[in-house]
Image: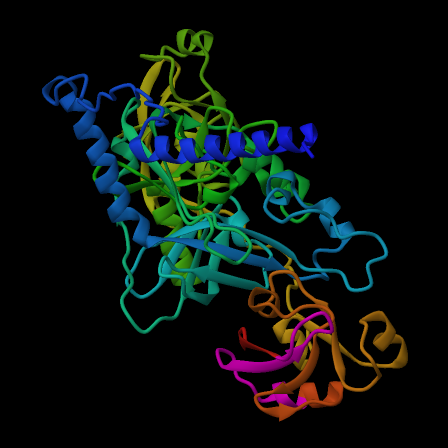
Amino acid sequence: MYDPLRAKAKVALYTAAAFVTGLGIAAGLGWTDVSVAFPALNEQPQLSEEAVRPALDLSEAFVNVAEVVTPAVVRIEARRPAQVASQGAQQEMPELFRRFFGPEVPDGELQPQPQVGGGSGFIISADGYILTNDHVVSGSDQVLVYLPDGRYFPARIVGADPFTDVAVIKVEVSEELPHLAFGDSEVVRVGEWVLAVGNPGFGGGSQLDYTVTAGIVSARGRGLRLLDRELGRDPRTAELAGFAIEDFIQTDAVINPGNSGGPMVDLQGRVIGINSAIASATGFYQGYGFAIPVNLARRVMEDLVEYGHVKRPMLGVQMQGVAPEDAELYGLPSVAGALVQEVTADGPAARAGIRAQDVIVAVEGQSVGYPSQLQQRIAQFHPGDRVEVTLYRERRPMDIDVQLGEAPINDLAPVTTRSEVVAEQRLGIHVEPISVENAQRYRFDEPGGVVITNVQRASAAERRGLAIGHKILAINDEEVESPEDVRDALDDVEAGEIVSFRVVHPAGRGPQIVNVRMPQ
């Protein structure tokens, strides 16, 4: 019997099969290809090399300078101890320094964590001396230096000077290190191209190795009173804040906290300054940055290396800048100089005969345009040196011979940054027995053994991956069953030796080996 529904289904089936077969044939013949016409891309230069040769040469100069300078620029990680980094101490910490050492310790935290700061520095000698900022390492009990090749070494703070924001640290290495050459900040001109180099990094890794920014020298002799204000907030230095020397080089090259302490270099790769203060409301770049002139930094460095502190010469005057009215009244040849407001009784200036209302215009023949420049001129000498001071008095120039004294800037109460610690705390861990309570807290099947219950920020343990909740199975292949076993295993480990931990985490898959170098 003829079934019309079945007949229609067969027709539809045959039609679909024929359509699919037709598509396959058409595809094989290329009939279904859709032709897309991509626009022709022009890769030819729009200008000849000759037309932009000056810019290309400048760009190549930047590249060459960066290649020479960056191998000597290091990342510095500085840890402030927990007892100094308590909430009370944090509140007393100057704002400029607080930017570099992180947030406050939370209230009620069982074990206050050290605060970790950092910045950049640059190697100045083949045997491992490094220049950086005072605020990068100030108050630290542990300083690590990360070299460009990925290695890191503990560093010793040779000396630091909060009155210029200059510090010297040193690493002990067996080979010679790449190091930078010094320029002359006195000959730096406004409008000159400079590069600001840093090695900020973060998190103990090398995810952000270098920053190289370019700009011009915008101004010289900037006295921002940044150091003066910060020193004034510290009761130990408040009365000595006037000894701060601020004669910054201003630049529009980007300077942020991470590259503070790094070098500012000229187009021949010579250091002309140390990247330092940031004058902004946020602490980050807002169009201008500042660097400590290298001539001043070099003089400070010499004292820090030789004595461990700065022997700052002192003239013994209070002064202010010269205004047009002052220049007219005192018969000055230009609106420049340092107007003496007060002379320290029985100080070097007083003994030499300098008086209030004298205007100092030169030291040893080098002109003085403003008070901070006079400070820097004097700082180039040593206590006891005799210098010739040129000044105007009663509208006439005269020269006075002054024997410099020594500024009382080293009579500061020391900051205690070290305390006795048990063996495991040298690595930055705290351990406890796995009691019934700890077994529940850290999700172990049963009590017994030792668990890490705290890991300090920026400690050797944290950098290598030891974490809260790790059960320590063995140290240097010796099984561990109690906190006393941990201390016994670590007590005889010398600084620089590598400790091998075998640990397991309840959320992990099997034991894990973590090798940690014992810090200084």
Image side of residue 49 versus residue 83, left or right: left
Asked whether, in this view, residue 495 is left or right of residue 220, the answer is right
- When the figure is inspected, residue 490 is found, relative to residue 421, above or below; the finding is below
- Compare residues 165 and 149 and report the one nearer the observer: 149
Image x and y of residue 9, in percent: 63, 32
> Can you give x and y, in whole percent of width and height, for residue 330 in the image?
41, 12
The reply to whether the magenta stretch includes residue 491 is yes
Query: Does residue 346 show up?
Result: no
> Residue 264: x, y in percent?
35, 39
- Residue at (66, 49) in percent of width and height: 236
Q: Residue furthest front?
A: 1
Identify the residue at the far right of this view. Answer: 437
Residue 215 versus residue 345: which sits nearer the camera? Answer: 215
Instruction: Report the residue at 66% width, 33% height from top.
Output: 6
Relative to the observer, which residue lies in front, 512 or 164? 512
Classify residue 254 as left or right of residue 489: left
Image quarter for residue 142? bottom right
The one nearer the camera, 340 or 138, is 138
Q: Quadrant of residue 400?
A: top left
Residue occupying the far left of the picture: 50
The type of colouring in the image is rainbow
The residue drawn where x is 67% and y is 77% is: 504
Quadrant for the N terminus in the image:
top right
Residue drawn at x 51%, y 44% is: 163
Q: Position of residue 408 (x, y in %)?
A: 54, 49
Task: Give the magenta part as a residue range.
Answer: 488-511
Q: Is residue 107 above or below residue 173?
A: above
- Is 356 colored magenta in this rendering? no
Q: Is residue 155 above or below residue 139?
A: below
Residue 478 can be seen, yes or no: yes
